[in-house]
Amino acid sequence: MDKRSMRGRGRGRDYNSTRKEQASGRGRGLQWRQVSRTREVGAFENNADERFNKTREKHSKAAEQAIKSSHTGYESSSDEDDLDDEGILSKLTNFYKGNRTGSGDGLILSHDEISLGKTTQYLTECCQSGALTCLVCISSIKRQESIWDCKACFAIFHLNCIKQWVLEGVAQATLLSDEYFPNKEQPWYCPKCRNEYPKQECPKTYRCFCGSEEDPHPDPWLLPHSCGSKCNKLLENPTCGHKCLLLCHPGPCPPCPQTVKLSCHCGKQAAKTRRCGSGNWSCGEVCNKLLACRKHRCQMVCHSGECTTCSKSSLQPCVCGSGKRIQPCVQPVWNCDKKCDKPFRCGFHKCEKVCHEAGQCGECPRSGERTCPCGKVSYVDLLCTEDTTPCEDTCGKDLGCFGNHKCSRRCHFGPCGSCPLMAKKPCRCGKREKEVPCQKEYTCETRCQKIRRCGNHQCRRKCCTGDCPPCEQPCGRTLQCKKHKCQMVCHQGPCYPCPLTSKVTCRCGSSVITVVCGKEKATKPPRCRKLCQIPPDCHHAARVRHVCHFGDCPPCKQTCLGKLSCGHTCPAPCHDNVLVKSETKAAAPWELPRSDFRVEKLPCPPCKIPVGVVCRGGHETGTFPCSESRDYSCGRQCGRLLKCKNHKCQLICHVVDDADVDDGHAGSNCAVCEEPCSKPRPEGCAHDCVTSCHDGECPPCHKRIRMKCHCGGVPLKHLCSDWTSRSLEERNRMTSCGTNCPRTLTPCGHMCPQTCHPGPCPPSTACPKRVTLRCPCKRRKKEFLCSLLQTEKHAVQCDDVCLEIKAARIAEREAAERKKKEDEEKRQLEEVEKFERKLHRRSRLRKRGSSQDVGANTGIWSRLKDSWLCSALQVVVGVAMVISAIAFAYLQTEV
């Protein structure tokens, strides 16, 4: 059941929605009214109606679930919605319909005059979901899938399917033909029309129908697999040189819609403006052209092409002219049976030819050079009246046998005859040899074991030469339609698709589409625009108008309008046939509960028509469903003025006793005022009145107020009545503690000069403090007022004494640097002297060791080493090393 059919059937749905609309903007007391109303409704609720509604809602949900689960869908292509075929066809043929004449006369062709032929059928099938089927895989072609279309039969296939078809077919054909045709180019064929394509034209990319765009983007406003541009293909039927004006489309291009001036076929009438696709026209008169027989004329009505052959007969002479007879004009030449009998030039012999043209008798066949029968002896001067004689030599003519034998007879007239010799001959297949008569062919009994081109059966022919004939057995394999078998002879590779077609119709049979065999169950039925003719199954006279469909009609959504017991009509949707679910509990723990669905007629629900009812307190008129109308409380407070004249009755809406309805005063059963005093307090007083609800003014407040002074450092206490009765100036004076303000001024940072005061402190420009300033060298100082420094810039400059002090400090710094440098040089000299002493000590040790090794050597050279020259040389070397060390240290210092 539709969800809308259950609207308003619950216990609180319409009631609560009505109450919310009536109670919106009514101010205080809404929550109390809703609580009271809920309690009142709960007190009078009908348990039977509640169970009815709950059960009906449960059954409706179960029925919807059962319908969804039992619905049988089609394959994936049926998920696509049908396109607006009328709009797309109109857009595609816009250029075709609106084309003007080529002659410039402004004529616009009518759409009724244009014969689109098969193009319209292809366009309609392309727009309809599930109508296009790939003959290779026998599945629907979706609008987003890549396709390829044959240029001959215009069949559409999946791009991947046609690639696989080409690869398998060419590969298998190549394997079978490599043995005998190694360099043969193997073509491939369309799966539907067998149109031949070269191997190089194997489709590789997905293109639109006209081929101008690669990978066309799907557009719901365009034809699937179309680029949306003009086709612009050259028209071929007839080949007029014009281009197709349709947008990119499947199928053949329609006839050329251009208009040109054309004469009739026979040329008798003047040229007329006609459609180019229709070609020349017929004027309706007799053609009367001279036929090929040159005796009769064409009696056909003005026609296209060449005139037919003459069907009449006439008297025709034979070739030699000696006789005549009635002969068809189509075959005027005939020969009689009379010999020529004209003498040759020799005068002895005559022409023996039968009926021939004059002058073609030729020379005497016995004149000129002649030979003996075997051709070995020639006769030059022999007369034509004399016969040639055989020679005495062997004939020697080739007998044409297997052993290339020669005729062994003497020269003779006539044929030589067959070879009489025996020869050892191989059979045709070459597997056996046998001695047989030379002129007789020898065949063995061995059967060929080769597999024929079908790849399934052996040749089995006796003594086969290797060129096995094609397989003649039927294929018999089940086609992809699963209904028929292949009727071709046994072949290699996949079978061609089933050539048969099936029709898929709508329920009423008005709309029909043609699909390939085996696809009728998986194809979505065509969309029928006619109305459903199934009679209603409820109490209504007719169903809601809807189009033709399969399966059960949708549930009736019309209003029931049945007469209820209260007098109103039932406003609920029709409930004559409702799918109800019933569950059967399992008989054993291992069994599952069983669910059954049945169609039942449900009774009308309780009346939900709203009826106005006044509440108990007379505040409002509430709206209730007719079946739930009763005395009720609106949930508001009573609101009548109590005796204290300050408050109203807080009881929930009730019946008022001993008071007029329109008076507004409380009755005897209204509440008694027990509230405290709620009169407004004086300005500044936050305490409650100590007395209960009363008339007149409240007494003065004697409570103390705690507060802090302006500066926040001292707590103060004052009577509430004294504080509220004073003016603002007196309150500021009462809040001051009388001490200096502890806050600092910004930005100078000095303490505020005033006593505790309200509001912000004075600005820093009025600060009375004095500030000390110094010169840059910090020797001189001077005092200024802080307020003066805030407005003007002041500075203390150095004098001459400050400059002298600065110069003396610079001199001291330079002297310290010089002293530091001298100390560094002295340290370096000490290091050089230390190094020199270390060097001398090593030389003396080395000298001492060499003198001990030499021992007794007392030559001139040894005496020179111990002399003073050696000592002087050492001194010079040492001094040089010291000087170099000093120079190096000085350079490092300078750097």
Image (tube, rainbow, N blue to C red):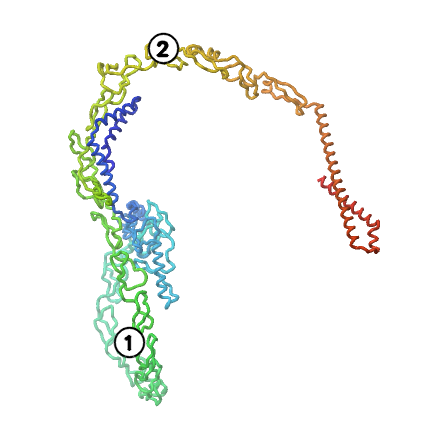
Residues tagged 2 and 1 counted as in contact (Cβ below 8 A):
no
The image quadrant where one finds the C terminus is top right
For residue 476, above or below residue 462: above
**Residue 694 - label:** none
Q: Name the residue under label 2.
A: 698
Is residue 63 rendered to the left or right of residue 797? Answer: left
Which residue sits at x=41%, y=14%? 684
- Please give left or right for residue 717 compared with residue 403 in the image: right
Q: The residue under label 2 is which amino acid type? A: Cys
- Percent coordinates x, y for residue 874 in the rendering: 80, 48
Where's residue 579, x and y in %? 20, 40
Query: What residue is rendered at 27% in x and 23% in y?
Result: 33
Q: Where is residue 555 in the image (x, y as percent from the top left)?
A: 21, 40
- Out of 734 and 276, give the one closest to the viewer: 734
Mark 1 sits on what residue? Answer: 357
Question: Residue 37, can we see it?
Answer: yes
What's the CA distance linking mark 2 and mark 1?
A: 160 Å
Is residue 242 shown left or right of residue 302? right
Mark 2 burial class by Cα count in 10 Å: few <14, some 14-19, many 20+: some
Residue ID at (26%, 28%): 16
Q: What residue type is labelled 1?
A: Glu
State the SS at label 1. Answer: loop
Residue 200 drawn above or below residue 64: below
Q: In which quarter of the image is the N terminus?
A: top left
Discs 2/1, front: 2
Is any part of residue 107 visible from this angle?
A: no
Locate residue 748: give its quadrant.
Answer: top right
Where's residue 327, x and y in %?
A: 22, 71
